[in-house]
Amino acid sequence: MTPQAKALLAVLGVFLLALPHIVNPYILSVATLILYLAYTGQAWNVMMGFAGQLSLGHSLYVGVGAYASAALFIHYGIGPWAGIWISIALCVALGAAIGFLAFRFGISGVYFALLTIAFCEFTRVGFDHLQWTGGSGGLFLKVAQRDQIDLANFRGPPAMYYYAILFLAASALLGCYFLLKSKAGYYWQAIRENEEAAQALGINTFRWKMLAVVISSAMTAVSGVFFAFYYNNLFPEQIFHISRSIEIILGPIIGGVGTLFGPILGAAVLTILADGITEILGVLGWEIPGIKQVFYGIVMLLVIMFLPHGIWPPLARKLGLGK
Amino acid sequence: MLSVQDISKSFRGLKAVSGASFDVPARSIVALIGPNGAGKTTCFNMIAGVFSPDSGKVLFEGKELQGLRPDQVCVAGIGRTFQIVKPFAGLSVLDNVMVGGFLKEKTVSGAKKISMEILRKLHLDAKADLPASSLTLPDRKRLEVARALATRPKLLLLDEVMAGLRPTECDLMVEVFRDLNRSDGLTILLIEHVMRAVMALAQKVVVLHHGEIIANGAPADVVRDPAVLECYLGEETVV
């Protein structure tokens, strides 16, 4: 890491730590959303950006992780610190099942992506009919007092959630940094670039792809737990919806697939853009239905046309940060 | 060291290789030559585990290889290059080689060290930090070799690594392989059309034609074999 990169990272760190004390609740909620998407995008990036396995159904792990911990909390009073392990175990089992089916039988590329969508969709339909979790009517956590911190049950004021997701996003960044610099990172990138050549160099590609899926699904399970306890309500139609999966992957794609800062930058750009457009249009008084989506779409088109590798790689070069 | 015994392979009824047998003794350099479509690369792929032979056996140090996956064949001690080069285009030259290096070296620093040594041997060390996608074809061929060598193979399979090289570059590569063979005791089996390299390197030449072996012996004898002259080398001996 270059000195400039370290300095920038330190400034960003201090800024993010101080944020709850300097901004209003609305900005804090936007920042929480950005970090949530950054963390989840980072998790997705392990599979696609590092190992080259395209998942278009990552909301499966968010949903299952969220539902498992929320249902255990509501029905049995099992707190999120215990429930999170159940969530992780369930998501890892699901990820491993999808990975096994695909990699064992040579399903790759778009067909693998379709398989991930299929799993996500039938889980959504399943949860619509699962009465234990409220079916399509949704599952609700009691909204507790918002002014005191109850860490054991992960209830508290917005700033607590902000710091929790900041911790997760920072840990994921650090974890992914070390993963990428390790043997696993080299092997994953080799598989991503050319699987046949990777295999000829003695890499058991099945095993390493499975590892990527397992790590990615475990990380995403944690974002599900966060989602459940932050938003307090879960609906299958929302949490498992394909647009949620797309939302997860847009950040890393716009920011830069396979880069460490891409998911963070992408999440920030997209969220600020979406909210900013709403604000600006509100000020201008343009109340045309769907106009926000039109602007959003135009900006994304421009990014994809002019920055096909995402915003981060050229930005990093400009700032002299190397990779 | 490597013993190929009566292997055959058909693709939808087309016999690519039928009943081929040959040996590669330890510490030797053996060349597999023949016209295009003779089944040379199919032979290679059967040894390297890309597909298993319909019949016959491939023995490496006494163990049967047929049915193993390519990564298991590599772990057993056989490195290979691809005729159509397959660099990890998005990674640097050094990182490409390090991927191979991790087979024997568990640490990043260890893999980096042996990878740099190998890059030096192949005169690619000056380009270590360039992305592999920026290399010219001759350099990509060299990178293929470097990557395979980084797995520390006992037997190296080279699939037309001299193709497209200028004569001086070709001589340089010949020198590299000769050195690896002499000083490290590396056994080499190469597919090659460049007779200049074959004659300089090989102690034994196996000629494949229409999936069958039509000659097998010392290079000097093989290039005078009438059957080989007729189907492959032509009337004027290329030496």
Image (cartoon, coloured by chain):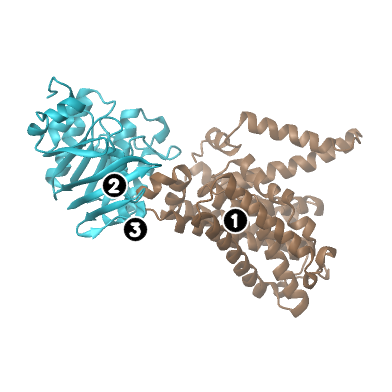
Chain colours: A brown, B cyan
Q: Which residue is mark 3?
A: B106
Q: Which residue is mark 1?
A: A170
Place of residue A250 in the rendered image (x, y in percent of width and height, measured from the top left): 67, 44
Q: Residue at left 78%, top 50%?
A: A27
> In terms of secondary structure, where does tag 2 sit?
strand
A257, A12: nearer the viewer: A257
Q: Residue at left 72%, top 75%?
A: A72
Q: Which residue is mark 2?
A: B8
Above or below — where is B89 with respect to B78? above
Place of residue A77 in the rendered image (x, y in percent of width and height, measured from the top left): 75, 79
Please name the amino acid that badge 2 sits on.
Answer: Ser
Residue at the outermost bottom position = A76
Tell me if residue B215 can be seen.
yes
Please name the amino acid that badge 3 sits on.
Answer: Lys
Give the alpha-carbon distance from disc 2 to disc 3, as whole Å.
38 Å
Q: Which mark is residue A274?
A: none
Above or below — where is B228 with respect to B93? above
B111, B191: nearer the viewer: B191
> In terms of secondary structure, where does tag 3 sit?
loop
Which of pointers 2 and 3 lies earlier in the amino acid sequence?
2
Q: Mark 1 and 2 residues: CB-CB less than 8 Å, in contact?
A: no
Give the alpha-carbon distance from disc 1 to disc 2, as whole Å.
56 Å
Please name the amino acid that badge 1 sits on.
Answer: Ala
Q: Residue at left 90%, top 35%?
A: A288
Chain letter of the residue beneath label 2 in the structure image = B
With B46 as the anchor, is A129 left or right in this view? right
Give the alpha-carbon distance from disc 1 to disc 3, as whole Å.
27 Å
